Amino acid sequence: MSTKKEIFVVIKDGRNQYYLLKIVTSDCDVYCIPPILGIHLSTHESGKSHFQYDSNEKELGQEPPVILAMGEAGTLFGNGIMRASLSDLGRASCICTATYPIGSLSSDFMKFQRNAVECFIINKDSFTKDTTLVEIGVWAVPSRNKASFDFNNPDIPEGLLYKLPTCEPQIWIYARRFI
């Protein structure tokens, strides 16, 4: 039986929250879906990772200013990458990284007005005033080797790290100032 979870990533600016990313997990498959971008990244239990166009999105030219990058190198296959399988990982593995400008949230992103069970709320005030870009990272972290995440992502404050420990590997999402 498949266990499906949705995690929403939003940024809070004053009283408003803006929708940045949805992560869907289904067993060992992970989908990273920025709203209205028209494309998402999926990484599957088999190790296949690829971008896929979303057919039901708005007309081109309405996309938010987002950089969505595949997280780990691998071997090319068709339209994607074959990487290490997400099942039985021995170390933490980056699924994807997304970069967002935060200078004009109200004009660049949709307001988030849902009641979500799993929601990572990032407070814009957690960053210095001169921060213009924020990086969101989505990682698969095996419970037996959490230290491998810390090694690759030192100094992530607890308030800027969200953990979904109900699956294996666990899904960890961080936010940090893009340098």
Image: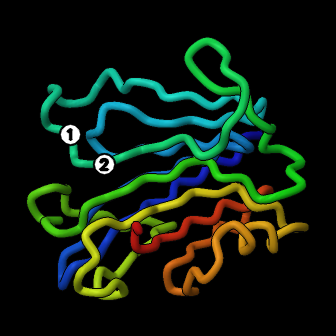
Q: Which residue is mark 1?
A: 63
Asked if disc 1 and disc 2 are in contact, CB closer than 8 Å, the reply is: yes
Q: Is residue 31 left or right of residue 47?
A: left
Image mark for residue 30: none
Q: Residue at x 58, y 86 (%)?
A: 158
* Tag count: 2
Residue shown at 71% from the left, 32% from the top: 74
Residue picked out by circle 2: 66
Percent x, y of residue 69: 48, 43
10 Å neighbourhood of mark 1: few (<14), some, or many (≥20)? Answer: some
- CA distance for labels 1 and 2: 8 Å
Q: For mark 2, give the secondary structure.
A: loop
Amino acid bearing label 2: Val
Q: Nearer the viewer, residue 136 or 25?
A: 136
Residue furthest to the top:
78
Q: Is residue 161 left or right of residue 129?
A: right
Q: Quadrant of the N terminus?
A: top right
Extreme residue toward the front, this view = 179
In the rendered image, residue 80, in percent from the top left (x then y), is placed at 60, 23
Which quarter of the figure has residue 54?
top left
Identify the element where label 1 is drawn.
loop
Vertical order, 173 against 34 (above or below) = below
The residue drawn where x is 49% and y is 29% is 51
